[in-house]
Each structure stands twice: as C-alpha cells, then as structure tokens.
Image: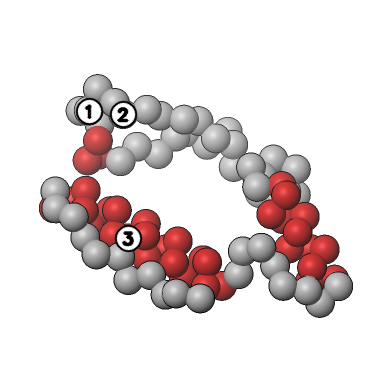
Amino acid sequence: MTPPIACKTFLDSPYFVTIATPTINTGAVAHHPFKQEIDNLVENILHDKPVLSDVLDACNSIAISLAIEQSAANGKPVAVPVEPR
C-alpha cells in the first residue's frame, strides 16, 4: 500500500482528512470505485454505443479540478471554463 498523499495547503486545517488508498500496479479494475462506469465503457465500446462518461466529461472534470486548486491557492472564486454539450 502506498502512503497517503497530503496537500500541504490543508495540513493545518481541523477538517483535513487523510484516506489511505491502495495503488494497484496491474490492469485489474476490481478495486476501482467506479465499477459501473468501467463496465459501461467496456460494454459500449464492444457494441459501438455512446459511453456514460466521454472525453468532454474528462476535460470538464479537469477544468473543475484546476479551478478548485486555483481557488484554494488564492482564496478567491474562480470561473470554470466548462464546455457545454
């Protein structure tokens, strides 16, 4: 098991929580917290159907994560450049 990673920005906060999670160095997804999403991805790729979560969802998730990080760093709200469908 890999030791948890702590964000130094929040270490002194009484609300900071460290959650230990295993790092699996294989292609196995049994430990994955999003099993239904993985199952949907595989099934829909095999049957040439749209997936639940696509590249646009991934890009928007990254944009939101970066905005959260920037907001935490400067203590101010940050506009999120999310791409609409």
Q: Residue 83's x, y, as percent?
A: 42, 75
What secondary structure is marked by label 3? helix
Disc 1 marks a residue whose amino acid type is Ser
Tag 2 residue: 16
Is the residue under label 1 in contact with that under label 3 (CB below 8 Å)? no
Q: Nearer the viewer, residue 57 or 5?
A: 57
**Which quadrant would residue 31 be assigned to in this image?**
top right
Disc 3 marks a residue whose amino acid type is Leu
Q: Callout 3 environment at 10 Å: few (<14), some (14 to 19), or many (20+)?
A: some
Q: Is residue 68 above or below residue 41?
A: above
Q: Callout 2 environment at 10 Å: few (<14), some (14 to 19), or many (20+)?
A: few
Disc 2 marks a residue whose amino acid type is Phe
Q: Which mark is residue 66?
A: 3
Q: Nearer the viewer, residue 19 or 43?
A: 43
Is the residue under label 3 in contact with that under label 2 (CB below 8 Å)? no
Marks 2 and 3, how far apart at CA: 19 Å
Q: Is residue 79 above or below residue 33?
A: below
Question: Which residue is at a point 29% across and 53% down the rendered structure image?
Answer: 68
Question: Which residue is at a point 24% across and 64% down the rendered structure image?
Answer: 79
Q: Residue 3's x, y, as percent?
A: 47, 33
Is the residue under label 1 in contact with that under label 2 (CB below 8 Å)? yes
Going by the picture, which residue comes out furthest to the top? Answer: 14
Tag 1 residue: 13
Q: Residue 59's x, y, as percent?
A: 46, 70
